[in-house]
Each structure stands twice: as C-alpha cells, then as structure tokens.
Amino acid sequence: MSFIKDKELELKELLNTLEYNIDDVKLELSSRPEFGMYQYNGAMSLAKQYHKNPREIAEEIVKKLKLDKDLINVNIQGAGFINISFTNEALTKYINKLLLNVQTSIDTYKTKKIVIDYGGANVAKTLHVGHLRSANIGEALKRLAILCGYTVISDAHLGDFGRQMGMIILEIKNRYPNLPYFSDSYSGEYPKELPITSKDLETIYPIANLKAKEDENFMNEARTITNELQKGHPGYTALWKYIYDISVKDIREIYNSLNTSFDYWYGESDANKYIPELTKYLQEKNILKQSEGAIIIDVSQKDDKKEIPPFIYIKSNGALSYEATDLATIYQRQKDFKPDEIWYVVDNRQELHFIQTFRAAYLSEIVPNNVKLEFLGFGTMNGKDGRPFKTRDGGVMSLSNLINLVKEETLKRVSDDIENKEEVSNIVAIATIKYADLLPTRNKDYIFDIEKFCDMQGKTGPYILYSTVRINSLLKKANNSNYNFIDIYNDYDLDIVINILNLTKAIDNSLKNKSLNDICEYLFKLNSSYNNFYNEFKILTEKNIEKKTSWLALSKVVYDINKMLLNVLAINIPDRM
C-alpha cells in the first residue's frame, strides 16, 4: 500500500477513536505549501454531521496528530483546514522501500476477472484513424488492470461477418464471375490462391460501398449474400476465409506497430456459431417478439427519459442483426470465461447500441445482475479545424499513413549521431501518438497537432521519453548497483518526493475512471520536477558522497516509475534519442 493511503487509514482510525464515524478520509496536496505538504479538509463536513464548530473538531484532531512521530508542522488554517508535513525520516524510509520494488506502492485486486473488448477492426477494410483510440485506450486499460492485479482477457472482436462482407464478396463476384466460389454445382476443393491481394481489398470495399449506396439492386444482392454466408454457404465461406486470412495479417501488423496485442482474435463469425443455441434459449425465455416482420426484444424501461428503441434480433429480411451478434458474443464470453466485468472500449456514438445490448443481456439473464457490463466511450481525434482527422484531400486517413506522417516529424528531431535513427524515430513516433491520444479525458474529443505533439518540450510523449532516456544514461554512467536514499537536501528533492507520493493516486484515479489522463498528467509532473532538479545540480560530479548517493537513488525511483507507467501506456523506451 502507498505511503499516503497508509496515512489516510491511520487518520481514519484516529477519527474513530474521537468517535467520528467516517467512511473515507482523503489527504489532498496542500493549496498553500508554506503551511504544509498535505491538508485534511474533513473538519467542515464533520462539523455539519455532528453539529459542532469545525475549528474545535480540527483542534481535537491536531492534538492527536501531533503525537505521530512521522508528522511535523501540524497546524490549522482558516475555519478548520488541517495542514501536515512528513518528516524526512518517514519519507526516506518510503523511498528506500520503492527502490526495492516500485510496485509495492500499488494496491492489487486479485478477485476479479475482466474481459476487455477493444480494437474492433473490420476485416477487408483499411484501419484508419478512427480505430486509433480504441486500440490505445483498450491496450492501456488492459495493462493497467493487470498491473493492479486483475485477471484480464482481451479480445479484438473483429467485424468479420456483417454486411460489408456481403458487399465485398459481391464485388469480387462481379469482377471474377467464373471463380468456383460462385457456382452452386461446384463440389471440388476451392483454390488456395486468388488474384486478390490485401492492396486490392483496400479498393474493393470503398467501391462496393459506393455501389451499395447508389444501386438498390446491388445492396439487396449484398444483403442476400451476407445472409447466405451467415447460414454457411460453402463457396462464400471459403472465399470469406481467404479474405479473412490476408486481411487479418495486415491488421495484426498495424496493431503490433502500436504495441497493441490481444489474447483472442474472436470476431462476429465466432459469435455466429452460438446463434442457434442462443435463439433457442431466448425462445424458452419467451422474450422474442414479432414486430413489422422483424424479431425483437423490448428493452424499454418505465423510467427512461428518452425513447430506447427495441433490440432487433433478426431483421425483417431474415438476416442476423449486428445487435444479435453482440448479444451472442456476451453469451459466448459468459460460457467460456465467466467474467466479473466486461469493458467495451468503443466510440461514444455507439452508446445507444450498447444500452440496448446490455439491457437485452440482463433481461434475458444471459449474464447475472452481479456481472458488470460497462460501456467505455471515447471522443474523436480531430484535426486543427476541429473536425475528424483527415488527409489533405479530405479523405479518411489510414493508421499506417498517420504513423508515417508522425515518423517524418520525429526523424527531424532525433539526434543524427544515432546509428539506428530510423528505429528510434519509429519508437518516438508511436510514443508521440499514444501519449497525445491518452492525455485527454477518455470521453472527450481532442485536436491532434503533429508538430506540437512531437516537441521535445512540453506535455508530450517525446518529452517523457527524453527525460527517461536521460535518467537511464545517468544511472549507467554512475554504474552504481547499491542505491540508498539518505536524506532530502533541498526543495528540488522534496518536490520530486512529493510527486512520487502521488503515484498511487494517479493509478487509482485512472483505474476508477477507466481513463489514462491521470497517469499521463502524473508523468509530466514527475518528470518536470525531476528535470528542474537535474538542471540545477551536477549529480555525477557532486563531491558530497551522501548527497550524490541520495540523488542517484531518487533518480532510480523516478526511472522505475517512468518505466512502469510507460509500459502501462504501451510505450517503448529507446536507449538513446
């Protein structure tokens, strides 16, 4: 447990001995550092609860706090704000504990199993900037949950069985009508090689999508093919498998470049296998209804402030709905994993869909009420014009093009004397993209400014990386394996130590809010305080051995924290920059 959490628990016990019953105690960073490091503001709320003067309550508390050997400068300001500071001895002891293992400051939760659904790439469609946030946020939340001790199962949940597959198969059929996949009389083995590459698929889908919008006959035929594919048409299934294999290979490469990985690469097609079983289950539950030719589940509730449309299970044309696939996916996950929670990291604009799907899951008792289904919506990544990020000609930018654009910028900034400059520039480019993407609160839109986010100064990925690389270089030059934090010698040291104390709060807030902005902000504050210290003192040439020893130990803790949190953000650290 962290230093501050320990002190909060001790303060809670102290309040209980004073016969003040309180569920939670929070120590906040002091708004007036001249009066103390931290402050407790609870005397005001206790005064309301117990009908007493807040100053009198504060005085009772302070009288007890002054007995704590770890505290100094305990005082009261204003109506009852209690300020405290910690002794150097107490802080030194804690920093030395972190030197052994920085993760000892983190609370772990080993009782929960969580499935995280993120990525959401569509097979045979190019990954574009709209897929970035799901990959980044989902991967970071997975790593954060694992760091905090959860059992985590990650699933890419590919879009591989919807209408777009019917469109693509139809466009291929129009181009290559003599392929055996389209002959009902064909009974041989289907070919393993086709005149279709992943590059071809990048153009086939946009063309097919445009035709579907402009030609109703094309759309209807695509719907028919989709329906037959979902029912197991042998030719369409074999062609689908070929498309799937070459497309997923490219998708994996893009995700790998973003340091994003999954335990399972399940897709809609995997959930489709459970549809007969799920349909029978829902029929037995008697919650499927006929409505205008479709089969639905009524998921409206009496206290709804706005109309929630019915959950469509089977469309009026007999095709399986997108909603049904997601319900079958929950059914599958419950059978296979029995999770305590399922987190869906998806665009804010899908909120209504997940309200309907979650309600259908609970109503049908596919999941018990104690299983938490959570929609984690995110905002859009926008260009400088405030609109969704696009290419110069106004098209949707692919993820690979975005990475290349940022890499071009980082190449200008990485030192020319580095032998593997190309590789380092790529690491810095990914750090630039990921830090910029994770810095805003998850559900907010943000503007992606390449030049600004590539800057080595300011609140950027390159700044955090450069600071980390510099600390690592310092530690290597010192060549010291026995670190020992002896004392705090100045305000620069103290500022770093206070930032270290706030590590657990940053992690807890990020986990609680399912948003990485607290960790990103924390990294900036910690490294800003360290760089102020680094620029003020010559660590390696310091003649006072105790000071030098302490400063190297402090540097080691900051480096270990950086390394741990950058790993959570899925950001690699180069040796040089």
Image: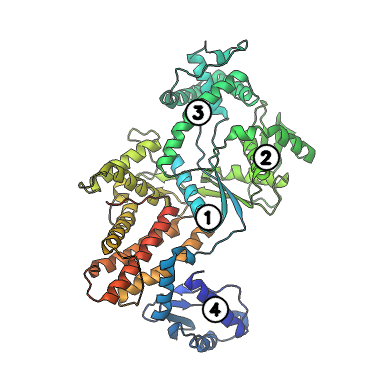
Q: CA distance from mark 4 to mark 2?
A: 52 Å
In this view, the mark in front (2 or 1)? 1
**Label 3: few (<14), some (14–19) or many (≥20) C-alpha neighbours in 10 Å:** few
In this view, the mark in front (4 or 2)? 4
**Label 4: few (<14), some (14–19) or many (≥20) C-alpha neighbours in 10 Å:** some
Q: Helix, strand, or loop for circle 1? A: helix
Query: Which of the 4 quarters of the picture holds residue 519?
Result: bottom left
Q: Helix, strand, or loop for circle 4? A: helix
Q: In this rendering, would 332 be left or right of 577? A: right
Asked whether 398 or 462 is in front, the reply is 462
Q: Earlier in the sequence, mark 2 or mark 3?
A: 3
- Against 12, residue 252 (above or below) is above
Q: CA distance from mark 3 to mark 1?
A: 31 Å
Give the amino acid type for the residue marked by disc 4 in the picture: Glu
Q: Position of residue 147 (x, y in %)?
A: 50, 57
Q: Residue 245 bears which disc, if any?
A: 3
Q: CA distance from mark 2 to mark 3?
A: 35 Å
Q: Residue 145 bears which disc, if any?
A: 1
Label total for image: 4
Q: Residue 310 bears which disc, if any?
A: 2
Q: Earlier in the sequence, mark 3 or mark 1?
A: 1
Give the amino acid type for the residue marked by disc 1 in the picture: Ala
Q: Helix, strand, or loop for circle 2? A: loop
Q: Which residue is mark 4?
A: 10
Q: Earlier in the sequence, mark 3 or mark 4?
A: 4
Q: Earlier in the sequence, mark 4 or mark 2?
A: 4
Q: In this rendering, would 542 be left or right of 122? A: left
Q: Earlier in the sequence, mark 2 or mark 1?
A: 1
